[in-house]
Image: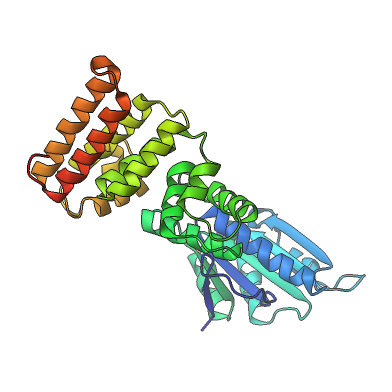
Amino acid sequence: MPARTPANAAPAPVTLAAPVTLVVGEEEFLIDRAVRDLIAARQAAGQAGDVHDLDAAALGPGELDALTSPSLFGGGCVVVIRSAQNAVKEVAAELTQYAASPAPDASLILTHPGGAKGKELLAGLKAAGAQVIDCPKVTRFAERLDFVRREFRRAGKRADDGAARALLDAVGSDLRELAAACEQLAADADGQVDEAVVATYYRGRAEATGFAVADHAVEGHLARALEQLRWALATGVSPVLICSALAQGVRLLGRVGSAPRGQNAAALAAEVGAPPWKIDRVRQQLRGWAPDGVARALHAVAEADAQVKGETASADYALERAVRRIVAARAGAAGA
């Protein structure tokens, strides 16, 4: 049975690519990285004299033998066949036959989305003993959180849970952007990466800062919410933006909490106008909330909104009071 390795697993020492490797899944960033890492491992060992990278649809019958033949200059070769599901029948048969008896100095890497198209080729390559690297789509908030943690470990840094969450809020859900952000923070930060480091690095992203305040508040972390609020105000973040983030956070609690239990995150995301990963996070945040508590929090945010927009002389005080009332509403405190 072929070995299976998740592409987003914890970092491991780089090893040489197997004679035939299948990179299976739909997460493009992880697929591209897996292919790059396999090629780099061969090159580091001096076993990648030639690298051929082409789409399966462009590969004609009989061409595989030429691509995997020994280089005139030695050093072996790497052949990358992308979108293997697009191979014509004759080429698919050649790939399966090759996998059963690969050339000694060549490494064949194929990518496949894992769907129904080309499933016979996929099954044949696995049966022939191809190494399999899984690159499933990363869709849930918890999965992205794990991805960020692993990226920091890959870069040789430790990051706490608050830092990972703050980075997701600041950067969003694109894995390429998240990986680049982790690499940059790991290079620039001294010691462990924490929430304060992330906040300082992304201080120009006002909306992300407001959402961080909102997340801490609805999760019941009063000290963190107030600390983030005061830092945001001190660095010039608009009170209106912060109040808007608080309102959005509490409204999402209400809308997600009132949705039918078990409703698909993607369908609910389309309904409420938020990304699926945000729905997953809000569902986690709903633990500890009761419907009447959400109603009290909505009232607190509505009052703060009116005060911030001109009904009070101190927007800072109005926001701090709103944060305290949201946290109290979650705890079910009387008079929230």
- The part of the image, by quadrant, that contains residue 240 is top left
- The part of the image, by quadrant, that contains residue 66 is bottom right
* Residue 59, percent from left and from top: 70, 58
Residue at image location 41% in from the left, 54% down from the top: 162
Position of 155 with respect to 42 (left or right) is: left
Q: Residue furthest bottom?
A: 1
Instruction: Say which of 281 and 114 sits in front.
Output: 281
Quadrant occupied by the C terminus = top left
* Residue 140, percent from left and from top: 37, 55
- Where is 297 relative to 29, above or below? above
Residue at image location 52% in from the left, 51% down from the top: 175
Position of 199 with respect to 128 (left or right) is: left
Q: Residue furthest right?
A: 73
Position of 223 with respect to 95 (left or right) is: left
Describe the colour scheme in one phrase.
rainbow
Can residue 180 be seen here? yes
Instruction: Say which of 226 and 157 sits in front.
Output: 226
- Where is 217 relative to 105, above or below? above
Residue at image location 58% in from the left, 59% down from the top: 31
Position of 221 with respect to 92 (left or right) is: left
Can residue 259 be seen here? no
Q: How many marks?
A: 0
* Residue 55, percent from left and from top: 66, 54
* Residue 51, percent from left and from top: 78, 62
Instruction: Say which of 326 and 24 sits in front.
Output: 326
Residue at image location 17% in from the left, 45% down from the top: 328
